[in-house]
Structures are given as structure tokens and as C-alpha cells.
Image (tube, helix red, strand yellow):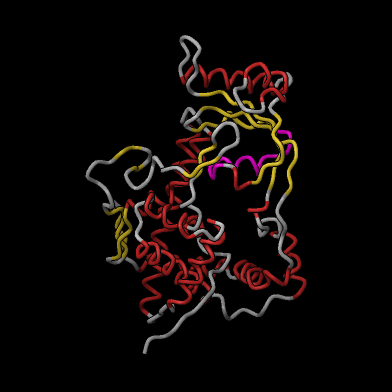
């Protein structure tokens, strides 16, 4: 008889698996305030930003016979690549270094995922279909405002069938269940431990879909009607403006003189804007940097954006009772970090791992 393991996805799940839940929604920031979901330009056909003809879904690694494909690796790296491309328009050494670190980390996490899944299979673990349905529905609510049609559209754009995505979700839950299995013999955290953990992480647990920011923006289009203008010269202009603002020149004055944004006549000042109206590769940058810091130029296919956040309203954090289980898992994970590391190392040492 197979052993049944059911577990809600713990907050301590490996990074690559939490990223998987965020990959499907792609927005491009259209000057003037409109947003649209558009097709990704670097999806499964790309590897390190370069098209690999005839190499789609080729093998990146084998783990005791299980396969990690380049398709999966690219899928997991996609949001990181987009954010770094926006942050480093010139794709210089810093971009390459950050991308290399991300690739190494995600690759290792995919390999570890296969190790854990093999253990799950060995003990006869199964995930009930209703648990998979619940997690998919949660993602549709969280990422698509409950609109299943948007979810299905993004699956098609990412080259994923519903069956494939369902399998990815099932594997995510299985990894969470196995990790919980190795953390279940610790004493429950005390009230004081939970309160300390809540104080540390309540901001990260908040509902980021309710985040809002007011900001000033200068937008320099990649294509201009000015004679002799090129995307390179436009980037140079944006870089020069950002440099001048950092040295003390007026953001509002330069916005009125140079910005092609819809709010240029107002000194580039935008009203409070929901986080969900930002492109996914801009939002983590804009909502992370301190208020008043000059951000950018950030790049997208339309041009270059210089941003200064003037006000920020964060979405609400849940009360402790609503996230008690997650906090307990965090505390236990901290206590068991050394043991969990030994377990993963043992799995790695006993496995036949081949990287290609």
C-alpha cells in the first residue's frame, strides 16, 4: 500500500519552486499608463539570452535517471533574466555576474528537487488530486485575479499544456511534503518564538497585490523622431539625466524638458499606482528601493525609465493567527537547518548526477 503524504506548500520551499508560481504573468509598461499582457521574448527557445536552434528541451542534467531539461531551467530563469535586463540595459559585467549566480543557484535547486522527488517516490508518496486543484486555484486567484482565461493564455504563451503545469504543481507540493517530513519531530515553537518570527517576516508575508506607489518618472523612448536619434543615443541621454538628477538637478524640471511620458507636464509626477499595474520585472525593483532614491534608467522594449518613488503604501500584513503554520515551519526550519543540509548532502553524495 502506498503511503499517503499531504502537505500544504511550506513557506520554506526552495526558491526555484516559489518562482514557478510567478512566471506566467508578463506585463509591458506602456507609456501613458496603459498595461497589457504580452508574449515573452525569452522563453523556452532561449538559453542565456541566445536562441538555441534544435536544442529545445534538451537535457541539462540527469539525476539518478531523472532528467532536468534546459526548457525547465530557462522557464525558472525567465523572470530573473527580465528583471536583470531591465536593471542593466547595457548587459555589462554586473548583469553577466548576477545572471551567472542565478543560473547556478536555480540549476542546483532543480537538481535538488529531483533528489527529493526520488525520495518521495521511494517511500511511495502520493499527492491527492484535490491538493493539486487547490494549489492551482490559489495561483489563479493570486496571479490572475481569479480569471482562468488569463491563466490559460499565459500557459499557451509559455508553451505549457495544462497537464505539464499540473505536473509542475504536483512536484512542488511533493517537495514541500518531503521537507516537512524531515522537520516534523521538533518541539512546536513557543509563543515567544512565533512572535519574534512574525516581527521579522510580517512585511514579507503581506499581500503585495495591495501595494501602491506614487512616483516621478522620466521616460525616454528607444525610438525618437529626432534626426540621428538611435536607441544607443537615447540610452545615453537617459543615463546623463539620471546622473544629473543624482548630482542635485531638479527631477521635475528635467522631466518637463526631456520626458515623453504622459505626466511630463506635471514634472513626471504619477499618482498612487497599484503594484499590479507595473510590469513584473520592474515592480520588484521599484518597491524595494528606498523612497527618494533615483532608480534607473530601467529598460523595456519601449525605452528607458528614470524613477523616483515619492510615496509608498504597502499591502496589509496578515495577523499572526492566519500565518501561524507558516511561521512554525520557519522556526523549525531555522532549528533544523544543519540537519536539513546534511540530508541534502547525503542525497547528493549517494546520487548519480551528470550535468551537461
The quarter of the displayed image where residue 39 is located: top left
How many numbered discs, if any?
0
* Image side of residue 136 versus residue 287, left or right: left
Residue at screen point 76% across, 68% down: 195
Q: Vertical placement of 61 versus 178: above or below?
A: above
Q: How far across and down, in percent of the image, does residue 193 sit?
A: 73, 70
Could you tell whether 339 is left or right of 262 in the image? left
Q: Residue at x 34, y 42 (%)?
A: 46
- Residue 86 placement (x, y as % from top left): 52, 35
Quarter holding residue 333: bottom right
Indicate the quadrant containing the N terminus: top left, top right, bottom left or bottom right.
bottom left
Residue projecting furthest to the top:
227
Q: Is residue 26 magenta?
A: no
Is residue 333 placed above or below 210 in the rendered structure?
Answer: below
Residue 9 percent location from the top left of the image: 53, 69
Magenta span of residues: 279-293
Q: Residue at x 39, y 41 (%)?
A: 42
Q: Nearer the viewer, residue 148 or 296?
A: 148
Q: State left or right for residue 310 relative to residue 107.
A: right
Residue 284 part of the magenta-drawn span: yes
Counting from the top left corner in percent of width and height, residue 68 is at: 33, 58
From the viewer's perspective, is residue 202 above or below residue 322? above
Magenta span: predominant SS is loop
Residue most extreme to the left? 54
As displayed, is residue 152 above or below residue 119?
above
Amino acid at each position: 500500500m502506498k503511503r499517503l503524504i499531504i502537505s500544504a506548500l511550506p513557506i520554506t520551499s526552495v526558491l526555484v519552486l516559489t518562482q514557478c508560481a510567478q512566471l506566467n504573468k508578463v506585463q509591458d509598461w506602456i507609456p501613458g499608463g496603459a498595461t497589457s499582457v504580452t508574449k515573452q521574448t525569452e522563453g523556452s527557445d532561449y538559453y542565456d539570452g541566445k536562441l538555441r536552434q534544435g536544442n529545445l528541451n534538451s537535457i541539462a542534467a540527469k539525476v539518478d535517471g531523472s532528467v532536468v531539461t534546459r526548457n525547465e531551467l530557462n522557464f525558472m530563469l525567465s523572470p530573473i533574466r527580465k528583471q536583470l535586463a531591465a536593471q542593466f540595459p547595457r548587459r555589462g559585467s554586473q548583469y553577466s555576474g548576477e545572471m551567472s549566480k542565478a543560473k547556478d543557484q536555480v540549476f542546483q535547486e532543480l537538481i535538488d528537487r529531483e533528489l527529493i522527488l526520488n525520495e518521495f517516490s521511494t517511500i511511495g508518496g502520493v499527492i491527492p488530486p484535490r491538493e493539486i486543484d487547490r494549489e492551482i486555484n490559489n495561483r489563479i486567484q493570486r496571479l490572475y485575479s481569479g480569471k482562468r482565461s488569463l491563466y490559460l493564455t499565459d500557459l499557451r504563451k509559455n508553451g505549457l499544456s495544462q497537464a505539464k503545469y499540473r505536473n509542475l504543481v504536483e512536484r512542488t507540493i511533493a517537495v514541500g511534503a518531503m521537507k516537512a517530513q524531515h522537520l516534523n519531530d521538533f518541539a512546536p515553537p513557543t509563543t515567544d518564538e512565533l512572535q519574534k518570527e512574525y516581527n521579522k517576516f510580517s512585511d514579507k508575508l503581506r499581500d503585495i497585490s495591495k501595494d501602491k506607489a506614487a512616483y516621478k518618472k522620466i521616460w525616454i523612448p528607444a525610438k525618437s523622431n529626432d534626426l540621428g536619434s538611435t536607441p544607443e543615443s537615447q540610452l545615453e541621454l537617459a543615463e546623463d539625466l539620471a546622473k544629473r538628477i543624482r548630482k542635485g538637478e531638479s527631477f521635475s524640471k528635467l522631466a518637463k524638458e526631456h520626458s515623453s511620458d504622459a505626466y511630463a507636464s506635471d514634472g513626471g509626477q504619477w499618482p498612487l499606482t497599484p503594484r499590479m499595474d507595473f510590469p513584473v520585472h520592474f515592480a520588484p525593483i521599484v518597491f524595494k528601493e528606498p523612497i527618494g532614491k533615483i532608480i534607473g534608467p530601467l529598460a523595456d522594449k519601449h525605452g528607458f525609465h528614470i524613477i523616483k518613488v515619492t510615496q509608498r503604501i504597502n499591502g496589509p500584513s496578515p495577523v499572526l493567527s492566519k500565518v501561524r503554520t507558516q511561521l512554525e515551519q520557519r522556526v523549525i526550519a531555522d532549528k533544523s537547518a544543519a540537519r536539513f543540509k546534511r540530508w541534502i548532502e547525503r542525497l547528493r553524495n549517494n546520487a548519480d548526477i551528470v550535468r551537461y
